[in-house]
Image (cartoon, helix red, strand yellow):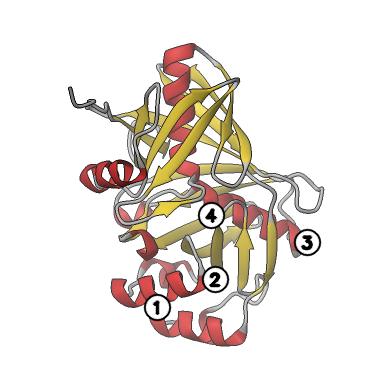
Amino acid sequence: MQHRWTVERLAAFADGEVGGNPAGVVIDDHLPDAATMQAIAAEVGYSETVFATPEDDEWRVRYFAPEIEVPFCGHAIIALGAALARRHGDGSFRLRLNNARIVVEGRQSEGGYVAALQSPRTHSRPAEAKLVEASLVLFGYNQQDLDPRIPPTVAEAGARHLILALKERGRLAVMRYELAQGRALMLAEGFATFSLVHAERPNLFHARNPFAAGGVYEDPATGAAAAALAGALRDIGWPHGGSIEILQGQDMGVPSHLHADISPEPAASIRVSGKVRIMPS
């Protein structure tokens, strides 16, 4: 008999009862083969579907976008944390990814769930001028659109992102690009997303995250990019005060809210948390 894989649907980093980034969650006593996971992710159609199976005292976890496997996906981890808490009660769950081991916490809260992840260690470096110019052309921006306080940065916290900070919120709101061109640039550079941000205040950011590499025009909430941004801000000495709030998805009509706690230790893991909304099956 062919195995039936049950897909749960949860929206991570929800803004109360709305918004958040939907993720598929498959929890089973064994993982499907890679081709099956890729096919399930394509059928589900969300930016990521996470697959998890118990293995000794931890959970073996893999993430698939509709077109590729990804090494780390923050919103899918948050969704998984809530799904595990639904099964096993409030707690902390150890996860083994392809390239890292991390922890996710999940607990019930006010009729829903909240979850928090600890990212892999962070790293950032200034983006090369040629890469910055190609990215500005892709989005129709120019050097004058950039916020000089936050230089273009390649940042990692389990996955790689290009951070471009814009001076004006309005320029972020009109973000447009060609999916095929964005995909080619992202795959060439190994980027999970472009992280386009605007600092309204030192600890409040608006963000948009194109995910062309995975076949998705834009993510409404991106935990991996939030961790990378937080690590990069720490590296440049940004006055974050120990944490930042990130508002994402507003320009898509899918309001999402992410919180990132920033340790002062260089390269240290970032804690990213948010609410989880259970979606109809």
Q: Nearer the viewer, mark 4 or mark 3?
A: 4
x and y percent of residue 61 in the render? 48, 36
Identify the residue position indicated by label 1 in the image: 139
Up-down relation of residue 255 to residue 68 (above or below): above
Q: CA distance from mark 1 to mark 4?
A: 18 Å
Residue neighbourhood size for the residue with mark 1, other residues' Cα within 10 Å, grouped as few (<14), some (14–19), many (≥20): some
150 left or right, relative to 44? right
Q: Amino acid at mark 3?
A: Gly
Up-down relation of residue 120 to residue 27 (above or below): below
Task: Give the position of the C terminus as an image quadrant.
Answer: top left
x and y percent of residue 53 in the render? 45, 26
Label 1 vs 2, first from the N-terminus:
1
Label 1 vs 4, first from the N-terminus:
1
Identify the residue position indicated by label 4 in the image: 225
Label 2 vs 3, first from the N-terminus:
2
Is there CB contact under 8 Å for labels 1 and 3?
no
Residue at 44% across, 82% down = 141
Residue neighbourhood size for the residue with mark 3, other residues' Cα within 10 Å, grouped as few (<14), some (14–19), many (≥20): few
**Residue farthest to the right?**
265
Q: Nearer the viewer, mark 1 or mark 4?
A: 4
Residue neighbourhood size for the residue with mark 2, other residues' Cα within 10 Å, grouped as few (<14), some (14–19), many (≥20): many
Is there CB contact under 8 Å for labels 1 and 2?
yes
Label 2 vs 4, first from the N-terminus:
2
Identify the residue position indicated by label 2 in the image: 164
Residue at 42% across, 14% down = 87
Q: Where on the picture, by quarter, is residue 148?
A: bottom right
On the question of residue 76 being in view, the answer is: yes
Residue at 44% across, 30% down = 52
Secondary structure of residue under mark 2: strand
Q: CA distance from mark 4 to mark 3?
A: 18 Å
Identify the residue position indicated by label 3 in the image: 237
